[in-house]
Image (cartoon, helix red, strand yellow):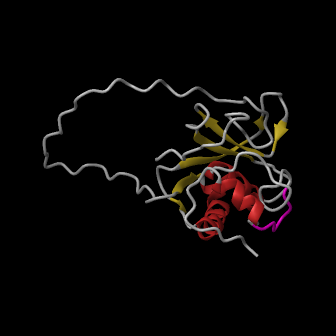
Amino acid sequence: MRPVALSLLGLALAVTCCGSPGETVSEMPAPAAEATVEAPEATTAESEPETAEPEGCGMVFTPVPELLEATEAAAARWSPATGCDVRVDEGGLPVVVLDDVINLEGESKNARTTFKGEPGAATPLAIEVRRDIPRDFGRVMVHEMGHALGGHGHTDSGVMKGKSEAGAPIDALSLSLVCENLSCVAFVPEG
C-alpha cells in the first residue's frame, strides 16, 4: 500500500485517536542503500496479483468481517468528500476489533488509529476498535478513517470532533483537517 503523505505532523508523530502525543508503535527503518536489481526472468507460472492500489489519492482498508459494513459505509462517505479512491479491498490497512484498546497512559479508549514513522513520513498501521464500544461502529469508523486518511488531531465540529455525535457530517472543518495531509482532488463537505 502506498503510504499517505503526511506533511504537517510537527506536534506529535504517532497520533492516535484519543491517545497522547508521542504514542508510537515503532520507528520507520532507515532507507536501504541503492542497489542494482536485475529484472526477474519470465516464468510460465501465474504470479499472485498485486493488491489494487488506488490511483492518485486514496487508501484501501481491509476490515475483519465484524466491521465490514461500517468500513464500507465510512469509505462511501470519504470517497466523494475527498474525491479520492477510498475503498475496502484485500491487502489494505487492517481494521480490527480488540477486547480493549489501551493508550500509553493505560486508559481504555473506544478506538484508535496507530502510525509509525517520522514527521512528514508517517504511515498508518491499523485501525483498532473496541468490541463493546458504547456507540455504534459506523460513527467510530468514519472518525478513525479520517485519522488514517490524514486527519491528525480533532476539530470543533463534524466527524473529526473528539467525541463526535452519531450522524455527524464530514463538515468543512473535518475535511480541511484530512486534506492537509491527503492530496484531495475534491472538497465536498456533507451537508
Instruction: State whether residue 128 appears in this view.
Output: yes
**Residue 66, visible in the rendered structure:** no
Decide: is 38 above or below 42: above
Q: Please state if 189 lies on the left or on the right of 92 as rendered.
A: right
The quadrant holding residue 188 is bottom right
Residue 159 horizontal/vertical position (percent):
78, 60
Residue 11 sits in which quadrant? Answer: top right
Does 122 sit left or right of 29 as displayed? right
> What is the magenta range?
164-169
- The residue shown at (84%, 60%) is 157
Query: Quadrant location of the C terminus?
Result: bottom right
Residue 119 rendering spot, x and y as whole percentages: 62, 34
Report the residue at 58% width, 32% height from top: 117
Give 27 or 166, whichever is nearer the viewer.
Answer: 27
Secondary structure mostly seen in the magenta stretch? loop
Asked whether, in this view, residue 29 is left or right of residue 11, the answer is: left
Magenta-drawn stretch contains 105 = no
The x and y percentages for residue 182 are: 59, 53
Residue 161 lies in quadrant: bottom right
In this view of the protein, which residue sits in the foreground, 105 or 5? Answer: 5
x and y, in percent, of residue 93 in the image: 55, 47
Residue 29 placement, left or right of 82 = left
